């Protein structure tokens, strides 16, 4: 939220929580698409990103100032890295998923 407080004028600083969740929602859609492109499935990634972006609950939470989009972003990233760590047999990706899951509990 701090970057939005610096960017927005003083009169519009009340919009910082809304802009933060909208930005995190857009970032989450891009991350989902990028994950599927990394797995060499861009069509499935496009469908997954489209489904996520048009989901009414996701759209509502991204427009709300008091939602847990930041925590859900960390949870999604944790499961992505856990999947990659198990399929590619890379231990550091599993450790990163544990760290991201800890951040999601902290947020």
Image: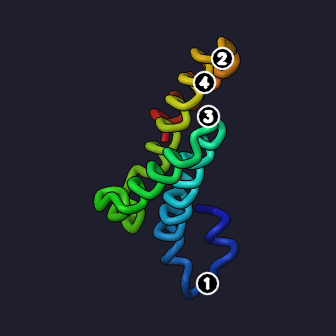
Q: Report the mark closest to the observer, 4 or 1.
A: 4
- Quickly name the residue at label 1: 10
The spot of residue 40 in percent (x, y) is 63, 37
The spot of residue 59 in percent (x, y) is 36, 63
**Quarter of the figure that contains the N terminus:** bottom right
| Gap in angstroms between the C-alphas marked 3 and 2 | 11 Å
| Gap in angstroms between the C-alphas marked 2 and 1 | 48 Å
In the drawing, does residue 75 fall left or right of residue 36? left
Cβ–Cβ below 8 Å for labels 2 and 1? no
> Which numbered marker is on residue 84?
4
Few, some or many residues within 10 Å of mark 1 (<14, 14–19, 20+): few
Element assignment for label 4: helix
Element assignment for label 1: helix
Residue extending farthest to the left is: 56
| Gap in angstroms between the C-alphas marked 3 and 4 | 9 Å
The spot of residue 53 in percent (x, y) is 42, 60
Q: Report the mark closest to the observer, 3 or 4.
A: 3
Q: Earlier in the sequence, mark 3 or mark 1?
A: 1
> Which numbered marker is on residue 88?
2
The spot of residue 12 in percent (x, y) is 55, 84
- Quickly name the residue at label 3: 39
Cβ–Cβ below 8 Å for labels 4 and 2? yes
Q: Earlier in the sequence, mark 2 or mark 1?
A: 1
Q: Is residue 31 above or below residue 4?
A: above
| Gap in angstroms between the C-alphas marked 4 and 2 | 6 Å
| Gap in angstroms between the C-alphas marked 3 and 1 | 43 Å
Few, some or many residues within 10 Å of mark 3 (<14, 14–19, 20+): few
Q: Report the mark closest to the observer, 3 or 2.
A: 3
């Amino acid at each position: 939220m701090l970057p939005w407080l610096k960017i927005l004028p003083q009169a519009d600083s009340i919009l910082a929580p809304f802009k933060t969740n909208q930005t995190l929602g857009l970032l989450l859609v891009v991350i989902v698409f990028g994950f599927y492109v990394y797995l060499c499935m861009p069509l499935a990634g496009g469908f997954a990103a489209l489904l996520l972006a048009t989901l009414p609950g996701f759209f509502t939470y991204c427009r709300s100032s008091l939602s847990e989009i930041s925590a859900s972003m960390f949870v999604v990233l944790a499961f992505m890295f856990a999947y990659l760590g198990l399929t590619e047999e890379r231990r550091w990706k599993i450790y990163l998923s544990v760290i991201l899951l800890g951040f999601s509990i902290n947020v």
